[in-house]
Amino acid sequence: MSREFAPFGAELWSAGGVYIEPPDPVLRLSEHGARTYPLMYRSEPVLQAAIQQRTATLLQKGWRVSSGSSGTKDAEDLADFSRHFLGSVRLFGSVLSESLDAIHYGFSLQNAIFGWRDWRGRPYFAPRRLIDKPREKFRFTRDRHLAYVGDGYVAKKVFATAKERQRWFITSWGTQNNPYGDFHTLQGSYLIWYLKNRFLEMWSTGIKRSMGIITAKQHGSSPAMSLARGPKGADGNEKTMMELVGELKDSIDLLDTEGVLISRHGYLLDL
């Protein structure tokens, strides 16, 4: 997990057709491949909260465009145009947030939708919307061109021409040598997430197997109580099956604190 990345284009990288697979050891070793990090984010609420908190902290001061120290009219005009352009991009706050995903995933990419705008009576053609795209469906070539690898339903494509490259806004984290990004939040959290999920899987398997041989018996002096008549509720009527199942679930919840023999609600549960 702690192995350093190879510089982009080094022989240690494995080529997959016209593109190169990420050098991230987590993605190479994980059974989920490129879907590992989105799966981590969706399945771990604590990780979600930490990522959202960090992103919100970075965004809370807002953004601004400065004309620099020259103070010339051209510099002021350029700054004013930049403010106008960025302010006209639809949902620009979301664009900033999605760009910061590079901190957590290594890189982020957004597809630009162009349109005509007007600034001081002069029209210009520029991105009016940036749409976040799933990282797991894209790779980079040795020339650092973005390549769409998809999911098998759409043909692969390399965005190599100048016009095609202009339609993609790509942010990489932590390095100039690797467009996939350097050591990032989710990569650093993978080992803990993996161990937790394996432990829960083993624990759930053990509980499932144990549940198959659990015996529930009603306390009482009459052996016929469990066959002829069911247990009574607070109103004196026989308890419904849902009430019995609810009490059984409550008893099972104590397995981790009471051991293999549990006594609650008048039941004995023997494993």
Image (tube, rainbow, N blue to C red):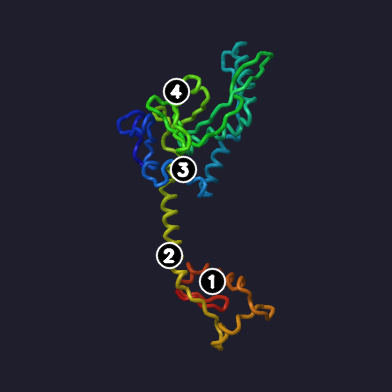
Query: Which disc, if any, is residue 251?
Result: 1
- Please identify, in this view, whether the residue under mark 1 or under mark 2 is nearer the observer: 2
| Quadrant in the rendering for residue 10 | top left
Look at label 4 and name its amino acid: Ala
Mark 2 or mark 4, earlier in chain: 4
Q: CA distance from mark 1 to mark 2?
A: 17 Å
How busy is the neighbourhood of tag 3: few (under 14 within 10 Å), some, or many (20 plus)?
Answer: many
Where residue 135 sits: x, y (%)?
48, 36
**Viewer-proximal residue, 152 or 213?**
152
Look at label 1 and name its amino acid: Ser
Q: CA distance from mark 2 to mark 3?
A: 27 Å
Where residue 202 sits: x, y (%)?
42, 60
Residue 140 left/right relative to 237: left
The residue under label 2 is 206
Circle 4: element type: loop
Q: CA distance from mark 3 to mark 1?
A: 37 Å
Question: Which residue: 46% across, 41% down?
Answer: 185
Quarter of the picture holding the N terminus: top left
Circle 2: element type: helix
Quarter of the picture holding the C terminus: bottom left
The residue under label 3 is 37
Circle 1: element type: helix
Mark 2 or mark 3, earlier in chain: 3
Callout 3–callout 4 Cβ contact below 8 Å = no
State whether residue 162 is above or below residue 22: above
Question: Which residue: 46% across, 61% down?
Answer: 204
Callout 1–callout 2 Cβ contact below 8 Å = no
